[in-house]
Amino acid sequence: MKNIRNFCIIAHIDHGKSTLADRLLQVTGTVDDRKLVAQTLDDMDLEREKGITIKAHAIQMDYTYKGQKYVLNLIDTPGHVDFSYEVSRSIAACEGALLIVDSTQGIQAQTISNLYLALEHDLEIIPVLNKLDLPNAEPEVVKDQIVELIGCERDSILSASGKTGLGVDSILEAIVERIPAPSGDVDAPLQAMIFDSMFNSFRGIIAYYRILNGTLRKGDKVKFMSTDRTYEADEVGVLGLDLKPKPFVAAGDVGYIISGIKTATEVKVGDTITTVANPCTVAVKGFEDVKPMVFAGLYPVDTDEYEELRASMEKLQLNDASLVFEPESSAALGFGFRCGFLGMLHMEIIQERLEREFDMTVITTVPNVSYFAYTTKGETLEIHNPSELPPPDKLEYVEEPYIKAQVITKSEYVGSVMTLCIEKRGILTNQLYLTSDRVELSFEMPLAEIVFDFYDRLKTISKGYASFDYFPAGYKQSDLVKMDILLNGDQVDALSALIHRDHAFDLGKKICLKLKELIPRQQFEIALQAAIGAKIIARETIKALRKDVTAKCYGGDISRKRKLLEKQKEGKKRMRQVGSVEVPQAAFLAVLKLNS
């Protein structure tokens, strides 16, 4: 066990983690050059297309140092703030971390938050300065930032380039020398923590774990502690580029188990595996529970596909434990699911994966966050959907979630970043100059305001230089109102939104104008209204398609024409009472994009 090293790679998005991981695999000979592609560990098409890591990937490497053979278990992690849950799971399975910093961009928001995660778990941090081959690299400036952030020795910062392979040998040596070997007892009762799982349509569910104590052998009867179910370990082994079966996996190592589990709900990430013959008494304290930040409804386009969508989402949840969902129904869209996501990018990725991996096309409702509503009777209700809000006469007040946001940007963009945050109801709490031209701005703002287009607009006004990170800061009372959209007096529940009173008028007007463009004209007039309670705040009218009933009257008495027009008017009135308006799917989707 003294020759095992478990480590992960953490960094801000686009600082070169995956490329550096490729070089480590190449130098240790884990992957031969024929199979090596750019971002070898990012095996999803989506990851390669977008150039981001979505899943944390584990792989085992063999490395010989000073005549001794070492086993290095590497877990490559995502860098985007929406996938920080993947990072927290990887960190829980390791003893050390490579902290990669781009020498052209310096320390950014996600670098800091991932570093704090690693320090909470007492990981040994190895700082690495990447992309030194680029002409605009500023190694000395960035080294100063790292020393200031971690308080490490300047000489302990390694220099590297993922593209050219510079410094990869010194990184491998540092992993062996600086990261402690895992502690644990091979002969103790088995105690293994599941940190990931995936669904294989031929073999069932494959669970990935890190063994803290004991040994897991092929054929053992094992028990999953949180579900209290027992299985037989049909196959155990370690993780290469493919699965490598072994007769046993011992304490300190990272491996996989296949036990013919077919039901997605039976495997929980963070669960403890032990043996039936010699069980451990306490479960491993895993990582924290996932806290969804953005809620939206996912509905199948065809209502018959509801059960199929449920099965697809359960399989996807195995691969992405941060997805949370529960059934709900809507008058306009039928049966679907209320889903919790970690952010807007996470929501987009889930939609894409459902479409690509499971051929499921879904409609998404307006994303929102969860609120607390306090009624006049003294009850507290958690509101995930605007339709759950009590009527105004029974409502005392509403609290919405606030976040502490950190924006790191160049000093020339400070003014425009502040303007954006204040427009989004943010309050500036701190301004700190990290270097002469890099500023860290701290804000307190409502989570609902960053759900839609905040991140995109921040990137635009800062020409891509601003980095953004946030964490929850509790709930605060706000002047929130429920805005309903009415079609001929009938409420369309899928278009209701909970928004701040100051923004309601503008958004109501925008939605009515957009719907006027998209809803086809009918034989009768349609009134589109945005309302807060009984008060109408915006209105548009879709004119009726009108047949010219007087066309056949050549000349003659005016009363003849008037009679025909009166008859038509009666017909339209009757039609309006019985006619219903279908809202096309394109209109739902367009209203969602209004805010983004």
Image (spheres, helix red, strand yellow):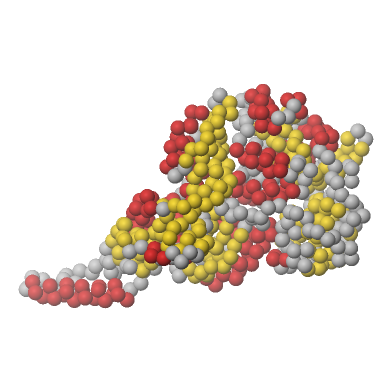
Q: Is residue 386 visible?
A: yes
The residue at the point 76 percent across, 56 percent down is 194
The residue at the point 54 percent across, 26 percent down is 437
x and y percent of residue 278 in the render?
89, 63
Residue 572 appears left or right of 390:
left
Residue 141 appears left or right of 94:
left
Residue in the foreground of this view, choosing between 438 and 78: 438
In the image, residue 390 above or below residue 214 = below
Q: Is residue 456 visible?
A: no
x and y percent of residue 307 in the render?
60, 71
Residue 233 appears left or right of 434:
right
x and y percent of residue 170 in the render?
80, 31
Residue in the foreground of this view, choosing between 29 and 495: 495
x and y percent of residue 527 in the render?
30, 64
Looking at the rendering, which quadrant does residue 207 occupy? bottom right
Residue 518 appears left or right of 57:
left
Residue in the foreground of this view, choosing between 545 and 102: 102
In the image, residue 185 above or below residue 14 = below
Looking at the rendering, which quadrant does residue 542 occupy? bottom left
Badge count: 0
The residue at the point 61 percent across, 25 percent down is 136
